[in-house]
Image (cartoon, rainbow, N blue to C red):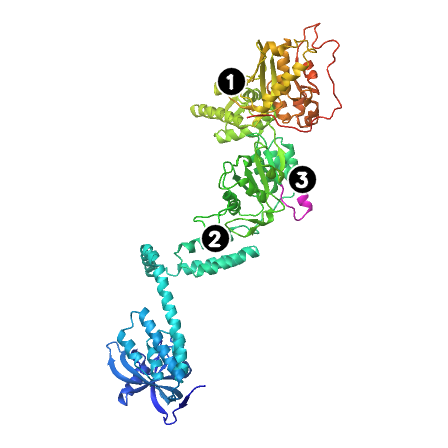
Amino acid sequence: MSLFKPNQSTSNVILPLLPLRDIVVFPYMVAPLFVGRTKSVNALSDAMNKDKRVFLATQKKASVDNPRDKDISPVGTIGNVLQLLRLPDGTVKALVEGKSRGRIIRFLQNEDFFNVEIRPEEAIQIPDAEEEALQRAVVENFEKYAKVNKNISKELVTNISAITNGSQLADTVAAHFSFKLDDKQLLLETIDAKDRLALLLRLVKMEIEVFRMDQRIKSRVKDQMEKTQKNYYLNEQMRAIRKEMGTEDEAADELNELEKRIKRKRMSKEAAAKARAEFKKLKLMTPMSAEATVVRTYIEWLISLPWYDRSKVRTDIDEAEKILNEDHYGLEKPKERILEYLAVQSLMKKVRGPILCFVGPPGVGKTSLARSVARATGRKFVRLSLGGVRDEAEIRGHRRTYIGALPGKIIQSLKKVGVNNPVFCLDEVDKMSMDFRGDPSAALLEVLDPEQNFGFNDHYLDVDYDLSDILFITTANTLPDIPLPLQDRMEVIRLPGYTEYEKYHIAKDFLIPKQIEANGLKDRKVHLSKKAVYTIIQRYTREAGVRNLEREISSICRKIARKFAKNKERQSFNVAGNSIAKYLGPPRFKYGQIEEKDQVGLVTGLAWTQVGGELLNIETVVMPGKGKLTVTGKLGEVMQESAQAAVSYVRSRADNLMIEKDFYKKYDIHIHIPEGAIPKDGPSAGISMCASIASALTKHPVHHDLAMTGEITLRGRVLQIGGLKEKILAAHRGGIKKVVIPKENKKDLRDIPSEISKELEIAFVEHMDEVLSHALIVEEGGHLFKKSDIPLNIAGEKPNDAEQLPTLN
C-alpha cells in the first residue's frame, strides 16, 4: 500500500506548454533545449515575459512536427527557464530546470502556442523502513554503475549519496541514465516515491547488466575488429560512394528480387521452408559479410534446381526406333530394352526410370548410345564422367560448414540441364577408386537404387531431392571392376565388339560422312571403295570398337583435303583398296594372325580382353632334363595352375597317348605364351596348354587354322567359359577356320552374328580327348590313341556351374 497523501493545498495553474521530442525532463534536472518550431518559440517568449515558468511535456511520437492535444503525454514537469539565447538561424537555445510534476487538466484556446491548465502532482511522503531500504539500494547500484562507467564523476556520486529525500533521489538518478523514452515517461508518471524507487532500482540493475555485457562483447571482438578494421573502413568508403552515386538501395533491391524469386519458384515443401528460413537470416546480416554470401549462395542453389521442371517424354515407339537405328548400327539388345521401357511408359502414367549399365570394350558406342537414347525419348542429356573420382563428396557434396562448399556432381548436373527427368549418363563407372576421403561407389548406391533415390539427400542442400524420374545409364569397360552391390542395382547390357561386316557398315553410313564434313569435303565428291574400307579395318586397326578406324579415315580425309587445296579445280576423288598404303603407310597388322603351317607344340588359344577378343599363341618345348615345368609369359596364378592341371592330365593319359610313362622324370617342359610384357590370367587357356603339351610329347603337329578355348579339370573334363562372342570374333578376324569350344557354351552361340557363324566350323567338346582328336594331326595310317582306347565321352554329366572369365589385361 502506498504511504503518501496528495497535497491538497496546491491549486491549478495555467502555463505555456513546450512539447519535447526524444527527451524527458525530470524535477531537479537542468537540461539545454534547442527549440525551432514556431509555437514552441512563442511559448518560451510568453514564459520569459511572465514568471519564466513553462510546462515541459514529451510527445508520444517524436516524428510528429505539428502535435495535437492527443499527441502529448498528459504528465510532465513544471520548469523554469534559466536562460534564453536566440541563434542566427532563427532557433532558440533554452536552459530549463525542472521543479515539480504536473498533469494537464485541459488545453486552453490559443493560436500562437499551447496553453494548458496544470494540476501540480505533489505528494506528502511518509517515510518508512521500506523506502529507506530502497534508497540505499538505489545509491548502492548507482555506485556500481559509476565503477563500470567511467563517464560518471566521483563528485556526482558523492552528491547523490547525500540526498535524503526519496522522490528527489529517484528523479536525480533517473536523469543520469539513458533509459528508453517509455521507461523514463513511466518514471515521471509514477507519483509515489516508493513505487518510483522500486521501478528505478529494477531499471538501474538492468542497465548495469546491459553495460557489463556490452563491455564483454566489445572486449571479445576487439581482436577481430582490429583484423577487419581495414575491410570495414573500405566497406564504409564503398557505401559512401554508392550513396553519392545514388545506388545505396541496390542491396535492398537485390533482397526484394530474391524474395520474389523464392515465392515464384515451385519447390518441395521441405525446400520451400528451408529457403524462407535462410532468407530471414539473410535479411538480418550485413550484405558484405562472408556469412551473408554463404547463405545467399545456398538460397540461389535451392531456387535454381529443377524441382518440378520436366521434359515432355516421347512415347511414339516407332519414331524412337527410327532414331535409334539412324544413330547406331546393330546393338539390338540395348535398343530393344529402351523400346520396352517406352512401351511401359506409354501404358502407365508414372514409371520409375530404369538403371541401365552398358558394358563393353572402348569405342563400341556406349556413351553415344546413351546420347541417342535421350534423342529417341525426347529427354535432355547430361553426362558425368566418373573416371578417377575418389572423393565421396563428389557425389554427395560438401556440408556448408566448409569454405567453398558446393553440392555434388549429381545436383550440379541437374542444375545445368534444367529438368528433373533427363537421361543421365554416368560414364566410366568402373574407373572410380577410393581413399581416405571415402568411397564414391558407395555413395552411388542410393543414387542408382530405384527404391531409394526418390529421397536423395545431398550434404550441401540438406533436403531430399527426387531422382526417380531420371533415366540413369552407366557405362563401363569391365564388369568385375564394379562393386557387387552396385552391380546388383543395375540392369547390365553387354555391348560386344563389332564384326568386320558391322564395322564396314558403320564406316560407310556414319564415320566416312562425318569425317568428310569435318574436313571440309562436303561439297566435293570423295569416295572410299569397299575394298579400301576393309583394308583399313583388317590391316590398320585391331580393336573391338571403331575409334581407331575413325582416326584412320580422318587421316585419309586430311590428305585428300590437302590435294584439293593444291588443285582447286579438282572436284572428285576415289580411294581404292590398293592405294591405302599411300595414305596410311605400310600395314600395321598382319591380317590372319595364324601360322602359315602346322607345327608341333604350337596351339592357338582364344582370350578375352578389355578391348575384345584376342588370339593367343601357346608354345611348348620338351627338353631332356629332370622333369621341371617352366611357365613363362607373365602368367597369373590361375593360368599357372591350369598348366599344372594340364601336365597332370597328360601324365594320367600317357599310356593311352602312347608316350613314355616316365616322361616327367626324363624331360623338362617349358610352356611360353608370347607378348611377355602383357599380364595374362584366367582358366580358359587350360585345354590350349594341354593340347600344346600333348603335341610336344607325341610329336603330332596341331592344325594351324584351329583355335580353342575351355577350362580343363584333372579328369579331362572341359568346362564352360565366358566372353565367347568376343573370342569367336577374334578367331574370325584372325583367319581361323575351326574353333573348339566347351559344349556347355552352345547356348551362347545365339549371340554370334549369323554371317560369322556361317564362315566358321565350331566343334563342341566335353572331354580333353575330344579336343586332341580335333587339334592334333595324325599321319595316315597312324593312331593318336591306343586301338583299345576310345576317346572318352562323358555326355550327360552335370557340368560345373561356376564360370570364371578368363582375362588378358
- In the image, 66 versus 16, the foreground residue is 16
* Left or right of 219 in this view: 789: right
What secondary structure is marked by label 2? helix
Crowd band around label 3 with a 10 angstrom C-alpha radius: few (<14), some (14–19), many (20+): few
Q: Is residue 658 left or right of residue 619?
A: right
Query: Which amino acid type is shown beneath numbered disc 2?
Result: Tyr
**Which residue bears the numbered disc 2?**
298
Of callouts 3 and 2, the N-terminal one: 2
In the depicted structure, whether residue 22 falls above or below residue 711:
below
Specify the label residue 178 is tagged with.
Answer: none
Q: Is residue 342 magenta?
A: yes
533 and 687: which one is in front?
687
Let me know if residue 72 appears in the view.
Answer: no
Which percent across, then down, holds residue 298? 47, 53
Compared with residue 200, is residue 651 higher up or lower down, i.e. above or below? above
Image quarter for residue 205?
A: bottom left
Count all numbered tags in the image, as a single digit: 3
Q: Amino acid at mark 1?
A: Pro
Vertical arrangement, residue 152 with respect to residue 406, above or below: below
Which amino acid is tagged 3? Glu
The residue that mark 3 highlights is: 340
In the rendered view of the protein, which quadrant contains the N terminus? bottom left
Nearer to the camera, 347 or 778: 778
Q: Quadrant of the C terminus?
A: top right
Direction front: furthest residue: 129
Q: Position of residue 711 (x, y in %)?
A: 65, 22
Q: Is residue 199 magenta?
A: no
Residue at the image position 70 percent from the left and 8 percent from the top: 783
Q: Position of residue 163 (x, y in %)?
A: 31, 82
User: For mark 1, what is the residue?
Assistant: 587
* Residue positioned most to the bottom: 9
Q: Which residues are magenta?
A: 339-354
